[in-house]
Image: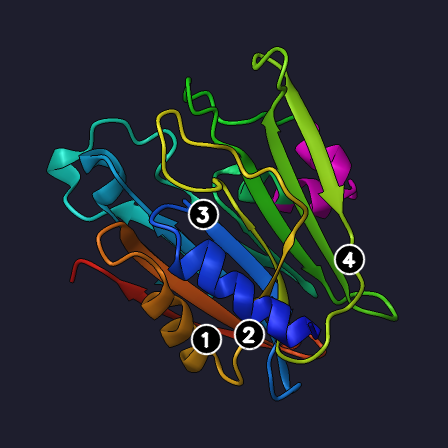
Amino acid sequence: MSAKEIASSTLKSHVAGNPYPGRGLVIGKSASGEAWQQVYWIMGRSPNSRNRQFSLEGTTLSTEPFDPSKVEDPSLIIYEAMLELPGQFLVSNGDQTRTLCDGLAAGKTAKQALSTRDREPDAPNYTPRITGQLDLTGDTPEIGLSILKANKIDPTYSDRHYYYPQEPANGIGYGLTTYMGDGNPLPTFNVDPLLLPIAATAEETLELYWDALDEDNRISLAVKEIALDGSSSRVVLRNKYV
């Protein structure tokens, strides 16, 4: 199969055919080849996880409570999900977005910045921390992906996986999700980054993934469209609860 056929098939099997891939991110180039895109979504099973929505201030995407009076534990559900530095576009499923942003600003590499973080402390799931970086500051674009997840032998430790894939073709993105599917405990994502489709515009990509995600468990979805040279960006988003 071609890369586009693999991406389409993976969207059907891992996202559309999966009741709970959990939180997910994708970084790639639009089908038109005219922009980069970052996709991020959140899902929820518990009332606390479902009591969320995306908010946007400038180009910073954050999660916030939908009903503040019903928040049980904000520690793992309220965070900045998308942040920017000049030519650097960051996305993650937790407050490690800020850790990475501050580390890069201080001259650290992504590995150095994220070495201070571990998988989430939510036993028995031990949810992975997934992070994506689009770096447009060099001569060639670079995508970096990271997943910090519990060690299989002793989950008190974290295994750290970093990926720097080749620049994708138009219409293709590289993606990570937190889980392989539903379950108790939830099965941790355990494969290489996925090939997933990116549509021509941010709006089309938003519709593509919103329609694919499980209707009961999807909560919010955002797509950031980034100029090829990193000079500008814009975000479109959708919240389940409005």
Lower sequence index among marks 1 and 3:
3
Q: Decide: marks 4, 2 in contact (CB < 8 A)?
A: no
Query: Could you give the CA–CA distance between mark 4 and mark 2, rounded to whole angstroms?
Result: 16 Å
Which amino acid, mark 1? Thr
Q: In the depicted view, which residue is nearer to us: 215 or 79?
A: 215
Q: Going 13% across and 35% down the picture, which residue do you hit?
A: 70
Which of label 3 and label 4 is nearer to you? Answer: 4
* Residue positioned 49% across, 42% down in the render: 180
Q: Which mark is residue 205?
A: 1
Give the dominant element type of the magenta stretch: helix, strand or loop.
Answer: helix
N-term mark: 3 or 4: 3
Q: Which mark is residue 80?
A: 3
Answer with mark 4 or mark 2, whichever residue precedes in sequence: 4
For this rendering, which residue is in front, 200 or 112?
200
- Residue that protrudes farthest toward the left in the picture: 69
Marks 3 and 4 in Cβ contact (< 8 Å): no
Say whether residue 210 is left or right of residue 188. left
Residue underneath mark 2: 198
Residue at 47 percent of width and 40 percent of height:
179
State the extent of the magenta-drawn residues as a range: 101-115
